[in-house]
Amino acid sequence: MRAAEIRGGWGLDNLVLAERPDPVAGPGQVLVRVGAVSLNYRDLLTVQGVYNPKQPLPLVPCSDGAGVVEAVGPGVRRVKPGDRVCSVFAQRWLAGAPTRDKIRSTLGGPLDGMLAERVVLSEEGVVRTPEHLSDEEAATLPCAAVTAWNALVTEGRVAAGETVLVQGTGGVSLFALQLAKLLGARVIATSSSDDKLARARELGADEGINYKDVPDWGARAKELTGGEGVDLVVEVGGAGTLQQSLRAVRIGGRVALIGNLAGTSAEVPLTLIFMQRVNVYGILVGDRESFEAMNRAIAAHRLRPVVDRVFPLDDTRAAFEHMAAGRHFGKIVIGL
Amino acid sequence: MRAAEIRGGWGLDNLVLAERPDPVAGPGQVLVRVGAVSLNYRDLLTVQGVYNPKQPLPLVPCSDGAGVVEAVGPGVRRVKPGDRVCSVFAQRWLAGAPTRDKIRSTLGGPLDGMLAERVVLSEEGVVRTPEHLSDEEAATLPCAAVTAWNALVTEGRVAAGETVLVQGTGGVSLFALQLAKLLGARVIATSSSDDKLARARELGADEGINYKDVPDWGARAKELTGGEGVDLVVEVGGAGTLQQSLRAVRIGGRVALIGNLAGTSAEVPLTLIFMQRVNVYGILVGDRESFEAMNRAIAAHRLRPVVDRVFPLDDTRAAFEHMAAGRHFGKIVIGL
Amino acid sequence: MRAAEIRGGWGLDNLVLAERPDPVAGPGQVLVRVGAVSLNYRDLLTVQGVYNPKQPLPLVPCSDGAGVVEAVGPGVRRVKPGDRVCSVFAQRWLAGAPTRDKIRSTLGGPLDGMLAERVVLSEEGVVRTPEHLSDEEAATLPCAAVTAWNALVTEGRVAAGETVLVQGTGGVSLFALQLAKLLGARVIATSSSDDKLARARELGADEGINYKDVPDWGARAKELTGGEGVDLVVEVGGAGTLQQSLRAVRIGGRVALIGNLAGTSAEVPLTLIFMQRVNVYGILVGDRESFEAMNRAIAAHRLRPVVDRVFPLDDTRAAFEHMAAGRHFGKIVIGL
Amino acid sequence: MRAAEIRGGWGLDNLVLAERPDPVAGPGQVLVRVGAVSLNYRDLLTVQGVYNPKQPLPLVPCSDGAGVVEAVGPGVRRVKPGDRVCSVFAQRWLAGAPTRDKIRSTLGGPLDGMLAERVVLSEEGVVRTPEHLSDEEAATLPCAAVTAWNALVTEGRVAAGETVLVQGTGGVSLFALQLAKLLGARVIATSSSDDKLARARELGADEGINYKDVPDWGARAKELTGGEGVDLVVEVGGAGTLQQSLRAVRIGGRVALIGNLAGTSAEVPLTLIFMQRVNVYGILVGDRESFEAMNRAIAAHRLRPVVDRVFPLDDTRAAFEHMAAGRHFGKIVIGL
């Protein structure tokens, strides 16, 4: 079978398709025929050697995939051959609070990832795919959608009638938009593009702010809530946007802080956090139980993830370059 | 101005329309011109002398009303003349945990209630009416809707994708149905009437169970969730239904226990509570902040309460008799 | 090695010591040399065939034990030979919400239990023993102490300054007493014996009520809190006591409902639940993470469990008869 | 009666003792004979014109005081003459979530404060003083102790066995130390002075770190928890310390962010927040109900606040200068 590998060194030039022997499911394991894989920014950083340069090579990249169980090893109880499943981002984070051990079990580094025709995972490390989704759609869920769900539900406890602000139109933000609507919330989306804002509205956004036109978009968001401020910001920009988010949010509000692209540290107006009694909570994807709860919501509402484009396995490099270009709207997928 | 009074003794024969001097708003108080009042079962029990027979008379009944602020006393900050407002069930339960003092401040006993052309309330004891609602519709909110909201949201923390079971088609149950849908939940409704189940489906119920046809409706509800059980039961029947509710609910599920009509005590299978680790929580309407949060959701979704019938003030007795007959679907309202 | 087995039928006469081959740890498993086992009422009911009469035999009874890891199978990461460990009551309930699958993995039925010189468990199904405890003491923790911890902490969220009422002087109740004191709470204990109340006071109880002398002990408990009512009742009596517990508790208070000895159903004054907005939550021991959190508290405070008496393995029958007699104060242990 | 006033301009030179007519309690108000006032850093910043320079003058400073009710106005229910009371920091934040309106009702600006022989407050704006405390001790509670309580309990949900890190030996930090011990937590204290660390140990601290000797004290704190990290940091330093706090905290841990002295913004390593899934929540004192809950704990444990020094009213300036010098250990009080 074929697998993509980072081999010999970091960088896209070292991301190659290799032939590997078909893996075999041991006790408590399942063999999955992968149908599709989705890319996250973390995967790009990994290939580039930015995310964790000490990671031993070769490495199969990508945490997120969906496919069909082909075989199960001895003692497997949770799934059976023929079941359609998605991978769980952190294979040992099944439930409860995160721990070092749990969060060091992520696919696509340190564990080999999903960008292979067949993979073997622990039976504990997969969830059932919602029936109405194709593998291409389901492959988008493990990282981006679970992150959005935990930002909004498990930690954010969004209730109907609250206002949620989402930033940009990347994978997490679009899932946050769609899931917030399922929860009955009002959504304000920001983008640098009026076209993307128009598409965000089609997905359910109630308001859009073009942050190129309105650099002080935090104040604008506050106006859009009658001066009170939004209840929750799904903060994905980090260094570049947290100041504005803290202007947008209401007293007693929440900011879900998600892996920031723009840098590892930021000048933060701490006064706005304590004088407004804001709760800023980091989100690191989430556990398997939250994935399963989200899938129930996705299935009940027949929510469809936004797939920007599907690349064939042979064009894996092009898929990563498409992500690096940053012009996508929704998720980039590789079909196997 | 005219006010309905229970005078001289209990019973519908002692519920009379009386002429009273117009009240005046003192410091921190507001004068409300009442536009409509809704009835709750508690109001009927009060008139009948069943609810709190030690209550001194005369008493103006009914906790729930909506109208317009006509005047405000010195120092009032929260509202101004012309504002449309609803009454708060427990006038001193503004926020936080319930206490004896807070829950002894209910309108319609011990405090004079809303069934009068004009009433004076503390400025703290009113909330703004959602704009899209008439007074007849808004008058249904203070008790039944706030009860449903707290059962589902504040205490129940229902998330999208969960399944909620509502019993019958009374005021609380229909609000629970409508609000659960706003929250993204799936709803199973029960009734003794296929006609009412059909109407419940029109309001959004996903499934209906006629409990006359299916006496073991708890087991049926469990089947409808793939054998897992429902996440939350809004239990309004009490003695007659709690056993079935405990069969319907999933392991780790919740039962919101709301004022039961059928008796003050019941034979309860305690084993089902601890062996299934179920949480059974009483709901006693709720605080003003939960009312305001609910109104944001109602306004955002332009939810319309189900009004069974509007009676004129002169037909107050007929309105109470209509409630006693128990054939209504939704809320009974008196227009003033 | 020797193991106690229920063999051929239910009843103490069928509880025998058998010779079994030494078990071997497979992949992901650990071999534990058991040092001590504690008895729970559930174990007695199991032997009597009352708890789950459909359970296949033979069965090794008892969920709770402590010992030393002698060997580990391939791939084990969490423990190593020489580690002192306790068993986890439900072997697959590691964290998160309970599910059918999780709670059907309990030791001592359906799975073989701890009353054997050597047992093999999943590496996930053990926790480290607090260093200051002997095996006899540590063996008391898995069921009774974890139940008390979850009643008070995970679900009960007891804070310093709150008042907790514990009933009687069985294993759960004494742990609830001791743990509530660690949390800074005030404790009211009930018992039918002044001697036992005196011993409860030595363990930290602030007040004692002899319920034989004061049958309306709920009212007495309310008086002891200045008329407000206690914040939390750890309810272990069930049918016989829940009415009084609902009189003792404050408005907005909590009742943790734990496996009741006195019957499977009870006449419950539902009005007291919803008119006082009480939260009645079932407790079914708890997950492994709660066990580990509790052990941190037990270790930090060097809390010592109350051991009533230690029997040798040869006197297993006498140990069960001692439990059936019901005169113990604290936990009954079998040393191996 | 005499009152301290900031009059004519900002700065200590403009803080003068003035003679004012005795105030009178109106409807719903209470007249309090102030026995003692405590200083917070906010009060110093207010006098200096740094905190809110747009505040109209004259202003009576200081939010925190304790005394005796001398008289009550019409309709007062909560207290009576002779009751000993403390002031509530935000007079309209009685319960529930913070709002703009609630947090704009703080004493010592915008409302006149407690540094006067007699003050009139809303009956809602006082709480009962724990009996075992003198006015000098009780005056320390409204701001610093309530802040610590909410950091630890309402938001922090500290349980026995957890580890809490407190910074320095100011008012909030010492209360956090003392209250964390009541809750059964282990406490690590930091200071630049070994003498102060020794005194912190006398108050119950389990470990001390001199951050002058150990600049990378975050790593040291992590070592002291076996490499896992502390469960909760009570962060009072802000810009200067948040980086170290984020190194000290465990994965999934909490940082309570309290008014920072060292600047209004800081370079924050956001990666440490989301990669460790840390919750950073601002604390802004808290509501009246949390004050009352804390007082129950303080009374039950007869906790005594740490009073650094008591100044007479005539030495008010010296008291403020003592605070500005920053060498105090515990709270600075002015006795009236």
Image (cartoon, coloured by chain):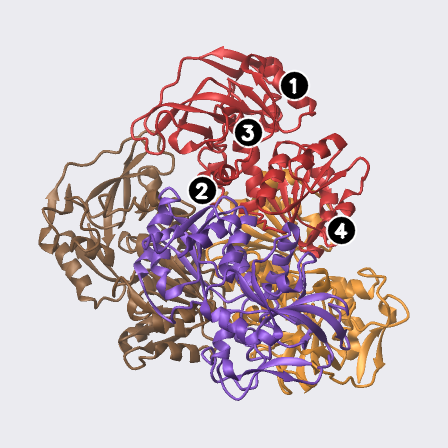
Chain colours: A brown, B orange, C red, D purple
Is residue C55 or residue C90 the one in the foreground?
Answer: C90
Q: Nearer the viewer, mark 2 or mark 3?
A: 3
**x and y, in percent, of residue D288 in the image:** 61, 65
Is residue A32 rendered to the left or right of residue C1? left
Say if labels 1 and 4 share a chain.
no
Instruction: Label 1: state its secondary structure.
Output: helix
Q: Amino acid at mark 2?
A: Ala
C-alpha distance separating marks 1 and 3: 18 Å
The quarter in which the N terminus of chain D is drawn is bottom right
Q: Which residue is label 1 attached to?
A: C321
Residue tagged 4: B264
Q: Amino acid at mark 4?
A: Thr
Asked if the residue under mark 4 is in contact with the one under mark 3, i.e. CB atoms within 8 Å, the reply is: no
Q: Spatial distance from mark 2 to mark 1, Cα to Cα?
A: 35 Å
Task: Work out which residue is located at the far top of the displayed protein and give it.
Answer: C19
Do the residues under discs 2 and 1 have CB atoms within 8 angstroms? no
- The percent coordinates of residue A268 (x first, y second) are 34, 68
The residue nearer to you, when weighing B247 against D211, is D211
Residue holding disc 3: C140
Q: Marks 2 and 3: same chain?
A: yes
Choose mark 2 or mark 4, whichever is in front: 2
